Structures are given as C-alpha cells and as structure tokens.
Image (tube, rainbow, N blue to C red):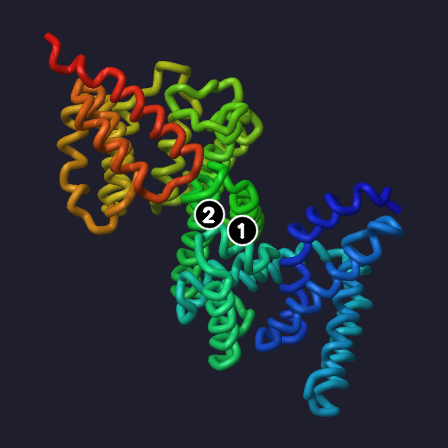
Amino acid sequence: MSAPGQTGVLLDHLFRRQAGRIVSHLARVLGPANLDLAEEAVQEAMLRALQSWPYQGAPDNAAAWLFRVAHNAVIDAIRRRRFTVDQESEAIEEIARAADALPDRPDLEEQLRDEELRMIFMCCHPEIPRDASVALSLKTVGGFSVPEIARAFLAEDATVAQRLVRARRQIRDRGLTLDMPGGLELQRRLDAVLDVIYFIFNEGYAAHEGDALIRHDLCGEAFRLARLMAASSLAEPRVHALVAVMAFQSARAAARVDELGDLILLDDQDRRRWDRRLIALGFQHFDRSIAGDAVSEYHVQAAIAATHARSAPGQVPWATILDLYDDLLAMNPSPVVALNRAVAVAKVHGPEAALAAIEPLREDPRLRGYHLLLALRGHLLAELGSRAEAAGCFHAALECRCSEPERRLLKRKLEECRSTEGQETIA
C-alpha cells in the first residue's frame, strides 16, 4: 500500500493515464450508445478511490483496482437502468467476462491501446462537429472534466456540457461504432484525428488567456495521443511528423518562461534549458517521417522546428526557414502561417520587407483582435525607429485577449517605446 500522503498525486496521475483507457474499454464492451454509462462508472471508481485511499493508502496495483471498481460500478448502473431482463443479463455477463479476462491477457496493453485509438477515431467522426470532437476527445480519452475543458477553451461550462450531450446523442442516434474505417475514409478520418490532436497541443502550448503561458496538461495529453498513434498500425509518415513537431516544441517549454513566469522570446532563450531528450525524440520521429513520397504540413513544420533545434545560438539559417515557410504557405495559405513567415522575412530581408508582408493581414477578419499581429507590427516599427506608432500597436495588443505572461511582455515593450518616443525625431 502507498503512504496516504502520496495518494492525491498518485490518483491524479492515474486519472489522466487510466480514465481514457477504462472508458474506451467499457464503451467497447457496452457499445458506444452507452458511452455515458462508461464515463459515469469511471467517475464512480475515482470517487471511491478519493474516499478510501487517503485513509487506507493506495493498493499495490492501483490501475487494476480502478478497472475492477469501474466494472462493478457499470454492473450496478445496469441494474438501476431500464434494461429488459434479457438485455440486463447479457450486459452484466459480458462485463463480468471482460473483468475476469482483463488481468490475464498477455496482449492487454495492445488491446487497451487499440480501444483508445478506436475511441478517438469515433470522437472525430465527420458527422460530429469539430468543437464537439475536441471536447469529446478530451472528456473520454483524456479524462478531462467539463470545467477543465471549459477553462482550456475559454468557454462556459454549460456550453461544453451541451456540446458533449449533442455529440453523445449523435453517436446514439446515428449508430456510430468503434469500428475503424478503411480505405479513403480511414485517410480522411486520420487527417481529422491529427488536426484535433494538434489543435489540443497548440491550445496548451500558447494559452490564449490565464496566468500561465503553457497548459502542460493539454500539451501532455495531445503528445500522449500522438505517440499512441505512432506506436500503432496507423503510424504513417505524417503521424511521425506530428510527433516530431510536438517533441521539438515541447523541448523548448522550460526556456520559454523565466523563474517569474515571464515570457522569453526565441532569440533570447537559453538553449541549454532545451530538453535534449525530447529533441532526440523529435529527430527520431522526423527521420521516420521521411519515408514515402507524400509531404504534409506536419513535415514542413517539423523541418522548421528541426532547423532551430540543430542550429547553434546566433547561427540560425533564416533563409532556409523562410524557404520552408514559403512551402508551408503554399500548402496552407492561412493568415497565421503568413504571420509566422513574416518573422523569417524580417530576419532575411529586414523589418521593412516584413511590414509589407503583414500589411494585407491587417484587413483579414480572421486576425481581427489577434494580439500577435499587433505585437509583431509594433516590434518591426520599433526596429525602424517609429516608436510612437509602435507604442500604438502594443497598446492595441494589450486590448486583445492574451495570457498574463504575454500581457507583461507587451507592457514592457510599450514602456520601452514610450521612454524613447522622442528620440525618433532627433537626427
């Protein structure tokens, strides 16, 4: 048994690690139409652990304990629900059989991994809207609560809850299954799954609001899901490319903020704080991603991140990075890609060229109220000595939604511009 004082940390870790596995496993046994029943059983198992482990200590095999209690909770719930006698008997028999067989299966890890993958592919079914797919993936596979999902995506608890209810209703009404699609449908669904995973990662890597720049829980769950896919039969080159992107970007996490939690820009980061283990993992998956002829956006993003990772401080080959951004923009002509490309333009061709590159973006409604566009424009204007105009950009950026570390950086930039504002007219 574990010491009572360690049980809170252990349970939190187990919840993140095991909740999705147990829900996916129970949903396979019960059928996706009873997804809510599977989730309730997992919540019940966690509640019982919270009630007993702090006083009795955690069992030696805590994960097996949670699986067993969740199975028992499902059986109790089935007996309370309006199943017919035959349905109840059949469901209880199947659950009991699964519970008895689970610990003895030599391929247990492979089975659980397969069930998790089937679950996230169902969550990303084309008939389920993307916002609901993200919420359902985090809830069922990631073990996130409704308030956690709402905080992560700056939504109301009720809004997230409604999305989950609608998604479960669609699963029920349309008879969606955990069967893996094949052929072209598999390729389309795989693209959707990768998009959802990367969306979750990005939301964690650059939080749009709140005290922290990075939501490590979101990043960690997205990274786990991507690596789960890379270890499966779905490990296509673009899957390895996505894992490489996440590994390279995660490697910089510790260097992105100082001890006070303030943001440190890429040029100013102490590269000795970059995680060499994650960088090595990134190159490992990047090498695997090169197989085949198809090149995805994740390949190009991985190549950009790899170029930064292998460059010595002050020796970043920005012309190479600009070429890669040109390729990425041709594949995905989004305003955010164009904005990131402008940073490379500034490094290669100077601030005037970069200002010209972002000028059309100022009219793009998708970037209206986007603090990073205003912040980059302010930075470029400051480099050109236009301090008053730069100050206006930083002031406008502060009116936009952003995280507290970003807000503090913008305030420092604004103060710097104001303190030197008069100098631009002295020549």
User: Looking at the image, which residue is at 54% across and 70% down?
Assistant: 179
Say the numbered circle drawn on residue 239: 2
User: Looking at the image, which residue is at 29% across and 35% down?
Assistant: 340
Relative to 254, 28 lies left or right: right
Helix, strand or loop status at disc 2: helix
The foreground one among 130 and 100 is: 130
User: What amino acid is at disc 1?
Assistant: Met
Local crowd at mark 2 within 10 Å, few (<14), some, or many (≥20)? many
Mark 1 lies on residue: 229
Q: In the figure, residue 125 lies in which quadrant? A: bottom left
Q: Is residue 118 above or below residue 5?
A: below
Q: Is residue 216 above or below residue 120?
A: above
Quadrant location, the C terminus: top left
Helix, strand or loop status at disc 1: helix
Q: Is residue 50 above or below residue 317?
A: below
User: Looking at the image, which residue is at 49% across and 81% down?
Assistant: 173
Q: In the figure, residue 267 lies in which quadrant? A: top left
Spot occupied by residue 234 in the image (x, y as percentages of width and height): 51, 54
Spot occupied by residue 15 in the image (x, y as percentages of width and height): 68, 53
Q: In the figure, residue 412 lies in which quadrant? A: top left
The foreground one among 2 and 121 is: 2
User: What amino acid is at disc 2?
Assistant: Val
- The residue furthest bottom is 85
| Mark 2–mark 1 CB contact (< 8 Å) | yes
